Image (cartoon, rainbow, N blue to C red):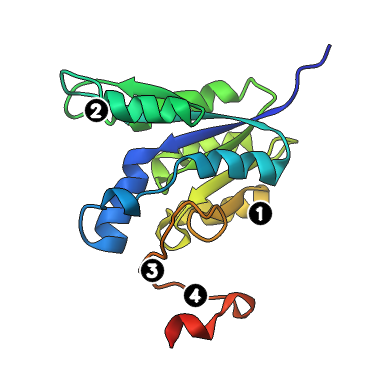
Amino acid sequence: MATKRITYVLIDGENIDATLGTSILGRRPHPDERPRWDRPLRFAEQEWRQDAKGLFFLAANGPELPMSFIQALTALGYQPIPLSGASDEKVVDMAIQKTLDALRTYQADVMLVSHDGDFLPQVEPLLGGSRKVGLIGFKEFRNSGFAPLEAQGMEFFDLEHDVKAFNATLPRLRIIPIDEFDPLAYL
């Protein structure tokens, strides 16, 4: 019996949070300004019309786990992956890189939620076959190394505009396709 194809949604929450806070808001995001994390998982299921499994990677270098956040992620359908390591180790990046490498042997699709170019060496080998590979983030902040991968089949999705992961409009400056332009937003 054939197994049902699945999309793995790999969340680099630290990267999204840092981009949102530093590059978009210019401050630490308030809780109501953070992504609604259920939406990337649902988006993946709807976009590629198959089940999705969410893996949410987070650094947990302190003495205690952020249990309320972990419980919330679990309730949303994610598998939280709390990681620890030396202070100079990027444990979230390392774990996502290992996961992307491991996925090379799976017949599964992948949506990575990050802007980080550290994943380019692991993402590129996933392209070129029947596997779907997508990157979710803020288009204007994704690493430029991802752009050439579009010719190899990589798909790009905007966290705010495609995934609709936010309840409020973010103060982003971006190029607006004319069919999306709403003059009322500026009046």
Q: Secondary structure at mark 1?
A: helix
Residue under numbered circle 2 = 89
Q: Earlier in the sequence, mark 3 or mark 1?
A: 1
Q: Earlier in the sequence, mark 4 or mark 2?
A: 2
Residue under numbered circle 3 = 172
Q: Is residue 47 visible?
A: yes
Q: Secondary structure at mark 4?
A: loop
Using the numbered discs, state the Cα–Cα distance from disc 3 to disc 1 in whole angstroms: 27 Å
Residue under numbered circle 4 = 175
Q: Quadrant of residue 103?
A: top right
Foreground tag (1 vs 4)? 4
Q: Earlier in the sequence, mark 2 or mark 3?
A: 2
> Which residue is outermost to the top?
1
Characterize the local packing of mark 2: few (<14), some (14-19) or many (20 or more) Cα atoms within 10 angstroms: few
- The residue drawn where x is 48% and y is 31% is 76
Residue under numbered circle 1 = 151
Using the numbered discs, state the Cα–Cα distance from disc 4 to disc 2 in whole angstroms: 36 Å
Using the numbered discs, state the Cα–Cα distance from disc 2 to disc 3 in whole angstroms: 31 Å
Q: Amino acid at mark 1?
A: Ala
Using the numbered discs, state the Cα–Cα distance from disc 4 to disc 3 in whole angstroms: 10 Å
Q: Earlier in the sequence, mark 1 or mark 4?
A: 1
Q: Image height check: is 76 above or below 98? A: below
